[in-house]
Image (cartoon, rainbow, N blue to C red):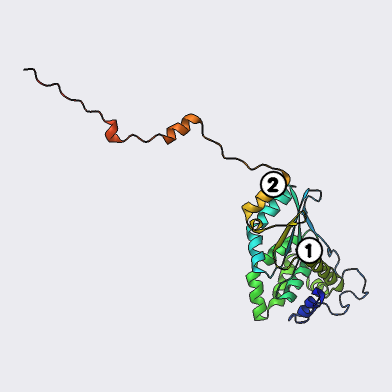
Amino acid sequence: MKISQWITLGLSGLAIAACGPSGNAGNPSGSGDTAVAGTVLGDVIMGNADASVTIIEYASITCPHCADFHEEVGPVLKERAEAGDIQFIFREFPTPPVDIAMAGFAIARCAGEDKYYDVLDDFFTNQDNLIQAARTGTVGDMLRAVGGRHGVDATEFSACTRDDALYNSMIATVEGGQAMGVSGTPTIFMNGERLGREAQFAEGMSALIDAALGIEPVAEEEAPAEEAAESEAPEESVEDAETTTEEPAPAE
């Protein structure tokens, strides 16, 4: 089954009002124009667009491992991006419940380029609440609340989550990921090379970025020779340190 069919089937079961593709409801013209002004399509770059190191993450807001990665490694990526060391790009790769993941991604894109990563952070931080809302049938309210916190009002929410042009753009992103061999999340690439397990940890990611930038690891400073000798010398016991003074024997 093609990925576009898989996503469409998932979206067809979305249990919230005005969510998911519905003909051209949000995009009556059927053109490539988006339904909500300011909606961003394609890659959203965090950091220095001219950086020599490009890190791409394929992930889903409904994936627990992705939430762990966001918490553990996300701060490192943000810090290095803001420092201009890297350009970071998040690409959607929805996991079950696919309909909710796609709706959340749509909201992030409709919030605009400047708020895109803030919305993703909101969803990852509140992932447990999102999944619980899905189980209790209140996910629509939560999605609207997240959108509202980032400037997507009720009218825009309705149009955003029905926007065929937006969904088709995200489907193309997913298919592009599959073409690169992505089959699970999170999957991380650096300059086109898929990273291994070391990239799943903050220290490992920092080391990988440093290596790509040609930054040598900082060696631990060696103690001066005298200090090292003193530290290695055995401690003298109190008993050894004491000297015994003998009284001279009486003269005969």
Q: Can residue 120 be seen here?
A: yes
Q: In this image, 34 relative to 227: left or right? A: right
Is residue 125 something one can see in this rendering? no
Q: Residue furthest top?
A: 251
Q: Residues within 10 Å of mark 2 (few under 14, many from 20)?
A: few
| Residue 116, image x, y percentages | 77, 62
What amino acid type should be assigned to the residue bearing mark 1? Met
**Label 2, label 1: how far apart the Cα atoms are:** 23 Å
Q: Is residue 9 above or below residue 81?
A: below
Within-10-Å neighbours for mark 1: few <14, some 14–19, many 20+: few
Residue plotted at (49% across, 30% down): 225
User: Which residue is at 26% across, 30% downward?
Assistant: 242
Tell which of 153 and 112 is nearer to you.
112
Residue at 83% over, 74% down:
159
Q: Quadrant of residue 139?
A: bottom right
89 lies left or right of 239: right
Please tell me whether residue 180 is drawn above or below residue 16 in the rendered image: above
Q: Position of residue 103 (x, y in %)?
A: 76, 73
The percent position of residue 207, horizontal first and vertical second, equals 65, 49
Q: Which residue is mark 1?
A: 180
Give the image quarter of residue 171. Answer: bottom right
Residue position marked by numbered label 2 in the rendering: 211
- Mark 2 secondary-structure assignment: helix
Q: Is residue 28 left or right of residue 96?
A: right
Identified by mark 2, the residue type is: Ala
> Quarter holding the C terminus?
top left
